[in-house]
Image: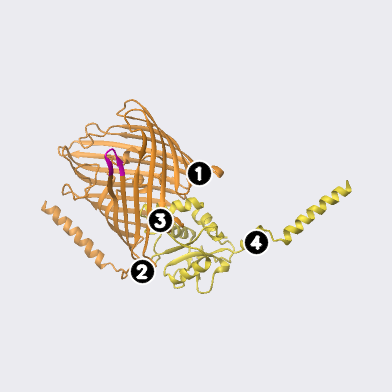
Amino acid sequence: MCNVVLRRAALLAATLVWVVCTPARAQHPDASHSRFTGFLFGDVTFAAAEGDAAEGFLMGQLVGHGNALLTERLSFFGELSATARQDGYAFEVERAIIRYDFADALKLSVGRYHTPISYWNTAYHHGLWLQTSVARPELIRIGGTYLPVHFVGALAEGSLAAPGIAISYEAGAGNGRGALIGRAGDAGDVNDEIALVGGVRIRPDFARGLQVGGSLYTDRITTEVASADERIGSVHAVWDAGAPELIAEYAHVRHEDDASVVSTSEGFYVQGGYRLPGVLSGFKPYARLERLFVDDADPVFESLTDYDATIAGVRWDFETVAALKAEFRRDRRSGGEWLNSFFVQAAIVVPSFEAAAF
Amino acid sequence: MKQQWRARAGTYASIAFLALTMQAPWSSTASAQEFPVAIVVHPDSRVDNVTFDDLRRIFTAQQQFWGDNSRITLLVRAPVARERKIVLERIYGMSEDQFRQFWIGKMFRADVASGPKIVYSSEMARELVAAIPGAITFLPLDAVTSELKVLRIDGKLPTEAGYVLR
């Protein structure tokens, strides 16, 4: 316990010394840099489904997002959501990030993030208008438990450009999962073990839109029913060059409990889409295959089950800032009966005046 | 038969004459297209030359700082301008809709703290790029004035053969 506290204090002191010693220009609010841009994302979905799933018109999340560039290097990002529930709306701070950009190669920040353990999690966030499909893949579902969606802590990130290639990285330390493993440790770490996350992404110049990457995440999980060391590894390959869209992601989760019993689970999805040419360029047919294999003996994932799904749909961007999606889904849990569902979703983004001028 | 042919030839000649004398819209577009698009920066910039890959990184905000570690301020001309069309095609490889969606996505992901500043005329672009240290924008070559610095792309100036933004 004492060692952990000392280790944390040393880490914090070293970071502060390094930050103070790093030469940076004097910062002041500057008319040429101080800017605020805001967005509002919203969606409404009509669902017709077999089984116990919710049907009818479903209000999705209403998400407000703001970017404030305060000085040449200091910025703030905030994202708030209101999610419809049976008993009202649940409000949540999804992201709140204070960031200082030293250079392209180093940007330091603190706050609440979407954990950079999954491509989807950091590419689409809560804006359903941004993503092609109606819903997220099961392995990174909002409110899900397979991967930690949110992360509270500090993050270093940056990009390094070499001839013909661009390399980006993230490295962070934070609270890890909360006592409810679907939530981040917003009010502090539930144990004295820091969660660590790191990732690398590579984008070659010769293939515009191609990105491959991988991430690692370690934490100590402490819940009412289980405690275990968690290790997550994920890899992704994405090709999003305008018309074609291909996203493939794989994530492996390993838990080792106090009796050294190891449980492993894995999941993946592959999504492909293609924006049609010419007068049909507003339409983008897509399909996705996803699988989640959960270790039944894993006490941390006691509420999680195997999942299989195949989806097919069409997205229609009838305006630059609005999309209509029609999607058929066939899925099953725990190897049970296949269930069919059909969704129609309207998703919109409302940009602030400055962003609307793009 | 001969009279019919003469009448038809007279009609074609009249149409050709009218097209030449009325200066149809496509004729003025053709003259404007002679000017390549110049990439210009703040006059104090130490940068003289960029590769096309570097230019794409700057315009897509993968690179947000110059070599001296000052922030890059990207100025982009509002829609309809010919130079914007060329930049969207050659540098971004995007349509107008894709360009707007690209920047909304960038900001929502917190990849950038702000999007490009939109300028509504060549005069506005000139004034801002000359006033903001670290600014970069694009202008038709005939709109570039002596107080601005024109960058070479892959070693070539806009007037040289093989320049990429034509």
Q: Identify the mark nearer the N-term, 1 or 2.
A: 2
Is the Cβ of the residue at disc 3 closer than 8 Å to that at disc 2? Answer: no
How packed is label 2: few (under 14 Cα within 10 Å), some, or many (20 or more)? few
Task: Using the image as rendered, state which of residue A149 and residue A194 is in the foreground.
Answer: A149
As helix, strand or loop, the secondary structure at mark 3 comes to loop
Examine the structure image and report whether residue A84 is included in the region drawn in magenta: yes
Spatial CA distance of label 3 from label 1 is 23 Å
- Indicate the position of residue A279 as horizontal and vertical percent values: 56, 44
- Chain letter of the residue beneath label 2 in the structure image: A
Residue on which the image places disc 4: B28
- Mark 3 or 1, closer to the camera: 3
Label annotation for residue B48:
none
Residue drawn at x 42%, y 35% as measured from the top left: A327
Residue A116 visible (yes or no): no
Q: Identify the mark nearer the N-term, 3 or 1.
A: 1
Q: Is residue B65 above or below residue A229?
A: below
Residue on which the image places disc 3: A352
Labels 3 and 1 positioned on one and the same chain: yes
> Please, what is the three-letter code of the amino acid marked with disc 1?
Gly
Q: Identify the mark nearer the N-term, 3 or 2.
A: 2
Q: Is residue B121 above or below residue A145?
A: below
Residue A78 image-quadrant placement: bottom left
Residue on which the image places disc 1: A282
As helix, strand or loop, the secondary structure at mark 1 comes to loop
Residue on which the image places disc 2: A30
Spatial CA distance of label 4 from label 2 is 42 Å
Is the Cβ of the residue at disc 3 closer than 8 Å to that at disc 4? Answer: no
Visual hue assigned to chain A: orange
Labels 1 and 4 positioned on one and the same chain: no
Visual hue assigned to chain B: yellow
> Please, what is the three-letter code of the amino acid marked with disc 3?
Ser
* First to last magenta residue range: A83-89
